[in-house]
Amino acid sequence: MVFDKEYEIVENRFISGITHLLRIRAPELKNVPAGSFAMVRTTLENQYDPMMRRAFAIADIQENDILLFYDVYGRGTQVLTHLKKGDKVSVLAPLGKKFFPENHSHYILVGGGIGFAGLSLFMRRLKEKGKSFKAIYGVRRKEQLSMLDWIKENGFEDDVIIYTEDGSYGEKGLVTKDLEKLIMEKSDTVLAVCGPKGMMRAVMDVAKKNKTPAYLSLESKMACGFGICIGCVIKDTEKNNYVRVCYEGPVFDGYKIEF
Ligand SMILES: Cc1cc2nc3c(=O)[nH]c(=O)nc-3n(C[C@H](O)[C@H](O)[C@H](O)COP(=O)(O)OP(=O)(O)OC[C@H]3O[C@@H](n4cnc5c(N)ncnc54)[C@H](O)[C@@H]3O)c2cc1C
Ligand code: FES
């Protein structure tokens, strides 16, 4: 069931780099599928700019709260930073129909930048189910590790390998640096990936070389978020037609799409 409601903001604060954390009291959303997303209205009261809601991954659920991590780029996310504890925010969620498959023996999660927020709830659910997994979190430099505190505070420190391109934290290099080695360590491994397109392409190159299944959580400009505006399409190369990221996704088999 999809809810379209005004929810109370419990916390909205700067974390690091350009990332903020928005914690919303939304008891109806406590059991949403990992990988689903929310369309959030980012207008101040009595204003209509921007008209369209903005999409954010549901990065975590803690008791009755959902957590969104958002990078500030333009008008919508700037407006979001002005909302305060106690304010109401209009949220349409949970959205998306296709998520990461759950029938594999071992998972490697690969998140780049804020893309890690598209994997964090899935990681929590894997851990709760006792599934075997390793996560990779890569950014350019330390200040961009906006989910580092969340990782530490939620007991995932031993599950996540961190890469910075400049070596200012964790391993120096790209998320693909040790990926092949990690893939070879276990059988029936599947990759769950979310991040910038360049990073996802590089991950797909490693996946293809090793014939490893890989599922990508994609982003696209979204106006509606539920399938009617046809604004978010990508090419399905298997069926040779177009599919909506918001409705047929946001998770796709990386071997079957053009992105
Ligand atoms: C399914 C889905 C899940 C998402 N999850 C998250 C999430 O968890 N956290 C998060 O921070 N973002 C997430 N995004 C991206 C987020 O929706 C956009 O960053 C947001 O809509 C930007 O809105 P804005 O009004 O601030 O910027 P706009 O006014 O829409 O854009 C301003 C400028 O910034 C550029 N821009 C906008 N977004 C991005 C971007 N993501 N990367 C680089 N340049 C950009 C635009 O091209 C434009 O030049 C997600 C998107 C989708 C589709
Ligand atoms: S955002 Fe409207 S169809 Fe996907």
Image: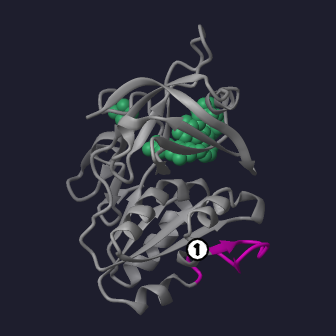
The residue carrying mark 1 is 175
The answer to whether residue 230 shows anywhere in this view is: no
**Residue located farthest toward the top when viewing the structure as drawn:** 46
Say if the magenta span includes residue 111: no
For the N terminus, the quadrant is top left
Q: Position of residue 108 (x, y in %)?
A: 43, 75
**Image quarter of residue 87:** top right
| Prevalent SS, magenta region | loop
- Ligand 1: give its quadrant: top right
Q: Tell me where the magenta segment starts and ends, as one range.
A: 162-177
**Residue located farthest toward the left when viewing the structure as drawn:** 239
**Residue located farthest toward the front when viewing the structure as drawn:** 63
Name above or below for residue 156 compared with residue 181: above
- Identify the residue shown where x is 29% and y is 61%: 256
Q: Where is residue 22 in the image (x, y as percent from the top left)?
A: 60, 39
Q: Which of 207 and 240 is in front in this view?
A: 207
Q: Where is residue 86 in the image (x, y as percent from the top left)?
A: 61, 25
Element under disc 1: loop
**Image quarter of residue 237:** bottom left
| Apparent side of residue 171 relative to residue 216 in the rendered image (left or right) | right
Q: Nearer the viewer, residue 74 or 41?
A: 41
For the C terminus, the quadrant is bottom left
Residue type indicated by callout 1: Val
Q: Specify few, some or many for label 1: CA neighbours under 10 Å numbering under 14, 14-19, or 20 or more.
A: many
Say if the magenta span includes residue 174: yes
Q: Nearer the viewer, residue 9 or 242?
A: 9
| Apparent side of residue 210 relative to residue 66 in the rendered image (left or right) | left
- Identify the residue shown where x is 33% and y is 82%: 211
The answer to whether residue 181 shows anywhere in this view is: yes
Q: Where is residue 6 in the image (x, y as percent from the top left)?
A: 46, 22
